[in-house]
């Protein structure tokens, strides 16, 4: 259970913060950057959901994903240990990744085939989903940078990769199953 009685602690005034395991690190630490970018992705999804309230598939799916992103943030904020008890440490699971893959396929099966790259835009929901997708890609890059120098649980990296794919197909769904996609026209604006 999480209990937050006091919102400010003053411990970060000098540029440091604590990880979930209590270790003090700089706010510029790669681990903090990774879970901070996940938090930013989650905030984007909160805005997306303002535009998907009438979508019986996307709205609850995105609500569940927001919860998953808190799990992912907790995962990234707690460096893995070789002897940790899987029942006691919150980690993203391969099952969560598989669920995203199933949902990507479910959404994509109903879409018209792509004939070009898609520009971010179309409906407000699609534009917001594309923004969330690009922020998710940044979170993925931050997590990959972290994984190059520290241990990161493999499902965490997979989850971010699949989530950006899901947000892409969700944007196409929000664009009338792809009918309202704004397609890239290579070289069309050259003078």
Image (cartoon, grey):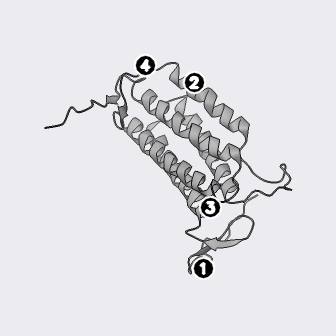
**Which residue sits at x=57%, y=23%?**
106
Q: Which residue is mark 3?
A: 31
**Which residue sits at x=56%, y=28%?**
104
Nearest to N terminus: mark 1 or mark 4? 1
Q: CA distance from mark 4 to mark 2?
A: 13 Å
The answer to which image quadrant residue 60 occupies is top right
Q: Secondary structure at mark 2?
A: helix
Q: Is residue 108 left or right of residue 76?
A: left
- Mark on residue 113? 4
Viewer-nearest of discs 1 and 2: 2
Residue 46 appearing in the image: no
Of 9 and 95, the residue lying toward us: 95
- Mark on residue 10? 1
How many C-alpha atoms fall within 10 Å of the one at disc 3: few (<14), some, or many (≥20)? many
* Residue 133: % across, % down: 47, 42
Contact flag, marks 4 and 3 (Cβ < 8 Å): no
- 112 lies above or below 10: above
Nearest to N terminus: mark 2 or mark 3? 3
How many C-alpha atoms fall within 10 Å of the one at disc 2: few (<14), some, or many (≥20)? few
Q: Is residue 151 left or right of residue 63?
A: right
* Residue 92: % across, % down: 70, 45
Viewer-nearest of discs 1 and 4: 4
- Mark on residue 105? 2
């Amino acid at each position: 259970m999480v209990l937050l009685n006091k919102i400010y602690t003053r411990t970060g005034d000098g540029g440091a913060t604590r990880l979930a395991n209590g270790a003090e690190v700089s706010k510029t630490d790669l681990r903090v950057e990774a879970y901070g970018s996940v938090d930013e992705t989650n905030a984007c999804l909160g805005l997306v959901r303002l535009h998907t309230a009438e979508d019986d598939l996307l709205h609850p799916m995105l609500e569940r994903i927001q919860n998953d992103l808190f799990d992912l943030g907790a995962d990234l904020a707690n460096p893995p240990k070789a002897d940790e008890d899987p029942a006691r440490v919150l980690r993203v699971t391969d099952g969560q990744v598989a669920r995203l893959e199933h949902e990507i396929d479910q959404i994509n099966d109903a879409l018209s085939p792509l004939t070009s790259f898609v520009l971010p835009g179309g409906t407000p929901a699609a534009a917001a989903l594309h923004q969330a997708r690009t922020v998710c890609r940044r979170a993925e890059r931050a997590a990959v940078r972290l994984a190059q120098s520290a241990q990161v649980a493999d499902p965490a990296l997979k989850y971010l990769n699949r989530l950006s794919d899901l947000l892409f197909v969700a944007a196409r769904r929000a664009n009338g199953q792809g009918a309202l996609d704004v397609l890239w026209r290579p070289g069309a604006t050259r003078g």
